[in-house]
Amino acid sequence: MLRYLPFLLIIALTIYAFIDCLNTPEEEVKHLPKAVWVFIILLFTIVGPVVWLFAGKQRTAAGGGYGGGGGRSRRTQWVAPDDNPEFLKSLRDEQEDKKDGEKDKE
């Protein structure tokens, strides 16, 4: 089983790079058109995916979302409900409405 591990890792790397390339918007792809990158990833088994991961896509700095160093990307980032101020405000408003409704019934 262990002798198959390098082949499985190469296949996993190729699949990851292929899917990442397909999901990347055209304006974030660097140096070559997306179709050429897909061809390179599939044709050059080890080198293609590695080159895509290091040079083919514009990468943003980690933690660059809210108040961090880097600029915001064009895509909106998902925020957990407990970190989302709008969601927390809606919960507070809902609790206040329930309290007001209970006071009116009394």
Image (tube, grey):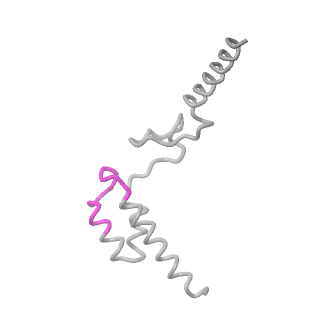
27 in magenta:
yes
Horizontal relation, residue 57 to residue 91: left or right? left
Give percent across and percent down for residue 30: 32, 56
- The residues colored magenta run 23-38
Count numbered badges in the picture: 0
Horizontal relation, residue 92 to residue 51: left or right? right
Residue at 43% x, 61% y is 54
- Above or below residue 99? Residue 80 is below
- Above or below residue 57? Residue 3 is below
Q: Relative to the observer, which residue lies in front, 53 or 102?
A: 102
Name the residue furthest front: 105
Q: Quadrant of residue 15?
A: bottom left
- Above or below residue 46? Residue 96 is above
Q: Relative to the observer, which residue lies in front, 81 or 26?
A: 81
Q: Relative to the observer, which residue lies in front, 40 or 84?
A: 84
Q: Relative to the observer, which residue lies in front, 78 or 69?
A: 78
Residue at 30% x, 50% y is 27
Give percent across and percent down for residue 62: 53, 47
Horizontal relation, residue 71 to residue 101: left or right? left
Give percent across and percent down for residue 71: 44, 39
Residue at 53% x, 81% y is 6
Residue at 46% x, 76% y is 11
Q: Which part of the image, by quadrant, shows the N terminus?
A: bottom right
Q: Which part of the image, by quadrant, shows the C terminus?
A: top right
- Above or below residue 44? Residue 89 is above
Q: Quadrant of residue 96?
A: top right
